[in-house]
Each structure stands twice: as structure tokens, then as C-alpha cells.
Image: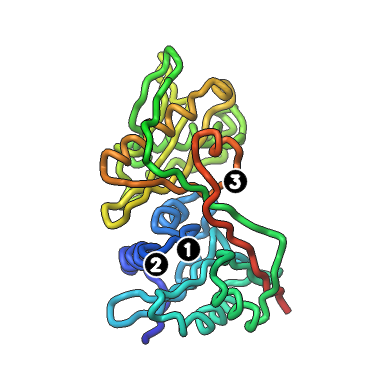
Amino acid sequence: MKFKNYNSKDYEAVCDFLIELNRDNQNHINWNWGRFEWMMEHPEFDKSMMGSFGLWNDGEKVVGAAIYDMYFGEAFVGALPAYSTLYPEILAYAYRELKDENGLGIAICDTCTDEINMAKSAGFALAEQTETVMLLDFDRELLIDLPRGLHFAQLDPVKEPYAFQWLLWQGFDHGTDKAEFERQEQIIPQDRPHLNPYLSVAAKNSDGEYVSYCCLWYSDKTDYAYVEPVCTIPAYRGKGVAKAVIFEALNRAKALGAKKAYVLSDMPFYEKLGFRKDKQFTFYWKRGN
């Protein structure tokens, strides 16, 4: 095994690692290649510290990784099944290099007893913090009812960065003042190597305004799509727009070969769409000195 710190040339190898990690089971589906790609261009993600990611390689193949989640203080720690003996070493690295003043938290699937026991042996303690992954099997037709006056459109964040960021600004409740948005946001085309614009679906009104959005991440190396993000501007909520946009995106992913979809959420909204709770991940914390 060879350890190295991450650089931009390792991007594809990390994505392949996350795909393989979730191939035989989804005990690490809260960390998948789609979430990794979405995070890397998230406005809150601190790119200046990416070199702190730790990678364990067998030849050119990444077999283990420690990756902070948005910023220091929470991290993903994982190893491919054949390399599970690396887990304590990866965990120790993550605590040493990725903690903040409060220590380090990691989310472990409740069914991964080996990882839980290794985390406890390393001084991590069970916390009340949890996250849920929900699953929708593509075993039924998803009927779309888009409200009158709206139509579907593809929203490419590389080609239309202003429209994309303005929609997310409103959709995630930062306000509806465009001047304030322009003062605070840097309009930068986002580099998302695996984004398929066909799965970047928005609803647009007759004035040409984007009002709701759903992006799916799908690779033909997997059998699932990952939902991230979903948002609707305040004036169009409660009208069934988000449901229609999500179903349109899911039907497109199904047509490309996806068999199911995951979303990191426990919102009743997704249950109403047919998602069911599939995996629960509980956080384990090791506090700082």
C-alpha cells in the first residue's frame, strides 16, 4: 500500500473508488461519486484544503480514502472490502489531519458493525446525530403532472452559471433580492466532469424564469441515480412543481439504465413521492484535545 495526499489528477480515481465501494452493497451510499462531485463545486466547500484528503493506493488504484465533508470537522472514512484492515489507519489519519477545534465526526452505517467497533476502539463515541438515505426502486411508472404555464428545460451550470446560482439562491431561502445575490455571489461556471445536462432538469415559466430544479447523478458503471440538489423558489412551492421536475429527471435516468434512485434525506416529502427509508447512518465523534 502507498499513501498519498490528494491532487486534482486523482479525481477520476477517487470517483472510481466510490463507485466500487458501493457496488456490492450500499453501506457507504451516503458517500458516493455523485455526492463527491456535487460537493467539490459547492460554494461552501473549501478547496484550499483539498490536499489534506488522504488516499491509500494499491498501484494506481485508490483502495481507501479520508475526505472532509465541505470543511474540516466531519469526514468520510472508507476502504474497499478487500482492504478493510486499512480502516484503523485511515481513521487515525482523518482524526489527526481533518478535525477542527471540536474534533471529528464520521457517519457509519448502522449495519457496519466492524467499522463501528474499530471507531469505538479508536476513541470515537456514539452521538445522537444521524443521516438517512432513502431509496426509490424504478418498478412503477412515474406519472408527471406539470402545472399549466410551465415547461421542462435543461439547466447546465457550466453554460448558464448565473441562472443556475440565482435559482439555487432563491430555492435555498437566501432571499429574492437580486441585488443582494449579485453582491454576495461570485458567478463562476462550475466544473462538473460527469454532469449529464439531460439529467439537470428545471421547470421554466412563460417569462423564461427557472422556478424549480432537480439534478441527478448517474453513471453507467452503476445501477443507481443520486438526487442532489432539489429546490423550488418560494412563489412556486406547494403547487406540485418539484414533484413533476423530480419525476421527469427520474424517468430520464431510468431510460438511461438506472434501476433505482437514492436521496440523502428523511423528509416526508420524499416518502410522498414513493421513496422509502433504506439506510441509517449514525455519527461517531472523537472530540478534540
Other-residue count near label 2 (Cα within 10 Å), few / some / many at <14 / 14–19 / ≥20: many
Task: Give the labeled residue for mark 1.
Answer: 28
Task: Give the labeled residue for mark 3.
Answer: 266
From the top left corner, tell me how far across and down residue 280 is, in percent.
58, 57
Q: Secondary structure at mark 3?
A: loop
Residue shown at the point (54%, 27%) measured from the top left: 233
Q: Quadrant of residue 164?
A: top left
From the top left corner, tell me how far across and down residue 161 is, in percent.
40, 38
- Which part of the image, by quadrant, shows the N terminus? bottom left
Q: Look at the numbered discs 2 and 3 and tell me whether their residues touch, using CB distance below 8 Å.
A: no
Q: CA distance from mark 1 to mark 3?
A: 17 Å
From the top left corner, tell me how far across and down residue 192 is, in percent.
35, 50
Residue shown at the point (36%, 31%) measured from the top left: 141
Q: Label 2 amino acid?
A: Leu
- Which part of the image, by quadrant, shows the C terminus? bottom right
Q: Secondary structure at mark 2?
A: helix
- Labels 2 and 3: the sequence-earlier one: 2
Which sits in the foreground, 106 or 140? Answer: 140
Q: Label 3 amino acid?
A: Asp
Q: Look at the numbered discs 1 and 2 and tell me whether their residues touch, using CB distance below 8 Å.
A: yes
Quick check: 138 above or below 238?
below
Q: CA distance from mark 2 to mark 3?
A: 23 Å
- Residue sitting at the far bottom: 1
Other-residue count near label 1 (Cα within 10 Å), few / some / many at <14 / 14–19 / ≥20: many
Task: Give the labeled residue for mark 2.
Answer: 21
